[in-house]
């Protein structure tokens, strides 16, 4: 079997056929329709996901504008997973049904978010301590969305002392889950902690005993190189790979991972291509949020697109201060014109740390 078949291949979740098994991870504040569409247009990504949507009794009517922004989607990005965050089975079921109606191809349950608020309210990673509750939620979501895949995204446990992933996976399977996403860390581990692929392997073996090859297990956690993906397959027997942070700085990542794993040449976007994609992304963000909010939302993406390029440090503060469309275009022109004219080429390529420092807030507030 060639690498292309072994590591990268189409993936079936219930009746849904994904074109390949590289998936974009849900990320609050990032994976809106604009970002997902860019990932799809650049290529290599088999499944995109919304950020988590809080479970409510009447999700489409309570907090309507937020719901609209979180769930807005377009045909070109499909297939699309939408994620429920909550703990009350009835609310999770109502929200799953609303996501189904809004165009989800998969509804997923969040059992991984480790922020304080999630832990205090018994949501996210706190559910890893309550396998039976996970079972009740999955059963309710299953009933509310009978015709589409229901999946669960979990961690290895609440913390190192409570590695309950097998109990939670079993409860999910017993109540009708169609696939399991496993972030191979426990709830107290920071993103820098190495992933533990033995946890993925244990879940895979459990799913296999339960239903043969019918229920895919998709690994998550720092799978941003071909080497990491090979390890997820070779050590964790993962059927697919879900990628989060690394995709934020690099829309070409999925495509290049496919290239690396299939022995085909990588794509190295030049400055012009990078700039064109940044502008396309901005225009999609404007459509979604309007100018005032859109330019604020775009600051972090702009920085990501330019990170690693010569001279980015000098522009860093200016990226963070963009407050209208005109400043955005002027700054982007300025930055890229310098690059294309070679004006900054003498400088070393500068990689600023993204989530760890540059966007610590994002990591603090979401998983
Ligand atoms: C800013 C940010 C927001 C996130 N939001 C969510 C979320 O809404 N739902 C979820 O299940 N995981 C969320 N995650 C976790 C990611 O989906 C993923 O599990 C984690 O980042 C590890 O994968 P990575 O190493 O590829 O980034 C978030 C992560 C980050 C960095």
Image: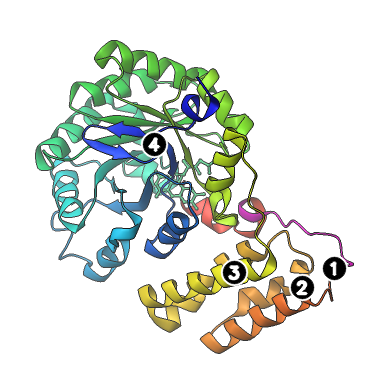
Q: Earlier in the sequence, mark 1 or mark 3?
A: 3
Q: Earlier in the sequence, mark 3 or mark 2?
A: 3
* Residue at 25% from the left image edge and 26% from the top image edge: 172
Alpha-carbon distance for marks 2 and 4? 44 Å
- Neighbourhood count class around disc 1 (C-alpha, 10 Å): few under 14, some 14–19, many 20 upward: some
Q: Is mark 1 on a helix, strand or loop?
A: loop
Q: Which residue matches tag 3?
A: 302
* Residue at 67% from the left image edge and 65% from the top image edge: 306
In the image, taking residue 17 as reference, residue 195 lies left or right, namely right
* Residue at 59% from the left image edge and 41% from the top image edge: 259
* Residue at 79% from the left image edge and 65% from the top image edge: 310
Q: Which residue matches tag 2?
A: 339
In the image, taking residue 42 as reference, residue 88 lies left or right, namely left
In the image, taking residue 172 as reference, residue 206 lies left or right, namely right
Q: Which residue matches tag 1?
A: 345
Alpha-carbon distance for marks 4 and 1? 45 Å
Q: Which of marks 2 and 1 is nearer the N terminus?
A: 2
Alpha-carbon distance for marks 2 and 1? 7 Å
Read off the magenta span: 346-355
Do callouts 2 and 1 mark residues in contact (Cβ within 8 Å)? yes
Q: Is mark 2 on a helix, strand or loop?
A: helix
Pick the front one: 10 or 354: 10
Q: Which of marks 2 and 4 is nearer the N terminus?
A: 4
Instruction: Determine the main secondary structure of the stretch shown in magenta.
Output: loop
């Amino acid at each position: 079997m060639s690498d292309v078949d072994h590591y990268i291949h189409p993936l079936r979740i219930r009746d849904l056929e994904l074109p390949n098994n590289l998936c974009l991870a849900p990320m609050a504040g990032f994976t809106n329709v604009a970002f997902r569409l860019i990932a799809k247009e650049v290529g290599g990504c088999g499944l995109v996901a919304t950020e988590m949507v809080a479970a409510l009794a009447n999700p489409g009517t309570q907090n309507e504008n937020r719901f609209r922004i979180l769930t807005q989607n377009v045909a070109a990005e499909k297939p699309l997973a939408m994620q429920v965050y909550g703990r009350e089975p009835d609310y999770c079921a109502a929200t799953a049904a609303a996501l189904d109606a809004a165009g989800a191809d998969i509804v997923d349950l969040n059992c991984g978010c480790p922020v304080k608020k999630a832990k205090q309210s018994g949501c996210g990673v706190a559910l890893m301590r309550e396998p039976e509750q996970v079972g009740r939620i999955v059963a309710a979501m299953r009933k509310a969305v009978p015709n589409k895949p229901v999946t669960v995204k979990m961690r290895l446990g609440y913390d190192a002392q409570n590695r309950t992933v097998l109990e939670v996976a079993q409860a999910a399977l017993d109540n009708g889950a169609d696939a399991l996403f496993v972030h191979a860390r426990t709830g107290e581990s920071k993103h820098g902690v190495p992933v533990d692929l033995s946890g993925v392997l244990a879940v895979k073996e459990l799913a296999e005993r339960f239903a043969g090859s019918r229920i895919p297990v998709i690994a998550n956690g720092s799978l941003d190189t071909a080497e990491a993906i090979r390890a997820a397959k070779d050590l964790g027997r993962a059927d697919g790979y879900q990628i989060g942070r690394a995709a934020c700085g690099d829309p070409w990542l999925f495509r290049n991972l496919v290239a690396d794993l299939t022995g085909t040449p990588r794509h190295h976007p030049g400055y012009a291509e990078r700039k064109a994609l940044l502008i396309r992304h901005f225009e999609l963000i404007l459509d979604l949020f309007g100018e005032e909010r859109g330019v604020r939302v775009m600051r972090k993406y702009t920085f990501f697109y330019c990170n690693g390029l010569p001279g980015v440090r000098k522009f860093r503060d200016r990226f963070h201060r963009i407050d209208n469309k005109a400043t955005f275009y002027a700054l982007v022109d300025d930055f890229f014109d310098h690059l294309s004219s070679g004006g900054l080429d003498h400088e070393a390529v500068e990689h600023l740390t993204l989530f760890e420092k540059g966007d610590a807030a994002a990591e603090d507030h979401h998983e």
